[in-house]
């Protein structure tokens, strides 16, 4: 038990450090305009995720051992799809009638929201099954993979620009 707590604590610390590195690298390479657009997209995804976690959130850790996983899983996926579509529809309504927000990235909003919600739903199921090592690994792997892809993309972009300039 103590080993799981310590490993989870270190995992969360490393994830926070990696997220800080992602923020610094993206701010330096993308500039304030693009970073602001990304922040607004993440904000919209967070709103959808908060509403979606009414059913697919960490409260399921309590219910999964007591009820049928198949029933919870199918209803959770159905809830995620319906809730994401309804939230994006409300955001589109607000844009059309009140000019609140942006309509430029609505497809990205739907796809990313659904992907993130399904990922967090699966993480809750892994946690409910008490597979702490897998949960910690996946919690660490996702931001670490993002940081490494950003480094590769930005270093490729910088080397490509230096070739064009020369």
Image (cartoon, grey):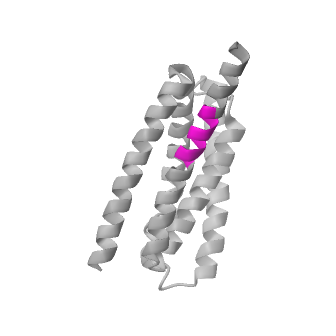
Asked if residue 154 lies in the magenta stretch, the reply is yes
Residue sitting nearer the eye, 16 or 46: 16
Spot occupied by residue 90 in the image (x, y as percentages of width and height): 62, 40
Residue 105 placement (x, y as % from top left)? 67, 33
Boundaries of the magenta span: 146-155
Q: Considering only vertical position in the picture, is 62 above or below 146?
A: below
Q: Is residue 1 shown in magenta?
A: no
Q: Residue at x 60, y 44 (%)?
A: 149
Give the farthest residue toward the front: 166
Main SS, magenta residues: helix
Q: Nearer the viewer, residue 83 or 27?
A: 27
Quadrant in the rendering for residue 13:
bottom left
Query: Which residue is pictured at 56% across the width and 46% down the height?
Result: 148
Q: Position of residue 124 (x, y in %)?
A: 49, 68
Quadrant for the N terminus in the image: bottom left
Q: Residue at x 53, y 39 (%)?
A: 42
In the image, residue 41 sits, relative to residue 138, either above or below, namely above
Q: 11 or 161, which lies in front? A: 161
Q: Give the side of residue 160 with respect to residue 21, left or right.
A: right
Residue drawn at the location 47% of the way across and 84% of the way down:
65
Q: Position of residue 118 (x, y in %)?
A: 61, 60
For the C terminus, give its image quadrant.
top right
């Amino acid at each position: 038990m103590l080993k799981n707590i310590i490993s989870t604590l270190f995992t969360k610390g490393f994830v926070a450090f990696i997220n800080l590195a992602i923020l610094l690298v993206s701010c330096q390479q993308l500039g304030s305009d693009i970073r602001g657009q990304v922040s607004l997209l993440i904000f919209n995804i967070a709103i959808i995720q908060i509403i979606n976690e009414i059913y697919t959130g960490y409260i399921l850790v309590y219910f999964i051992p007591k009820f049928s996983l198949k029933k919870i899983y199918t209803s959770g996926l159905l809830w995620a799809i319906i809730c994401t579509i309804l939230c994006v529809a409300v955001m589109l309504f607000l844009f059309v009638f009140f000019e609140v927000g942006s309509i430029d990235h609505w497809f990205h909003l739907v796809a990313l929201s659904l992907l993130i919600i399904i990922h967090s739903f699966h993480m809750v199921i892994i946690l409910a099954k008490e597979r702490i090592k897998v949960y910690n690994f996946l919690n660490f792997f996702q931001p670490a993979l993002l940081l490494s892809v950003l480094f590769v993309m930005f270093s490729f972009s910088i080397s490509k620009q230096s070739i064009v300039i020369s």
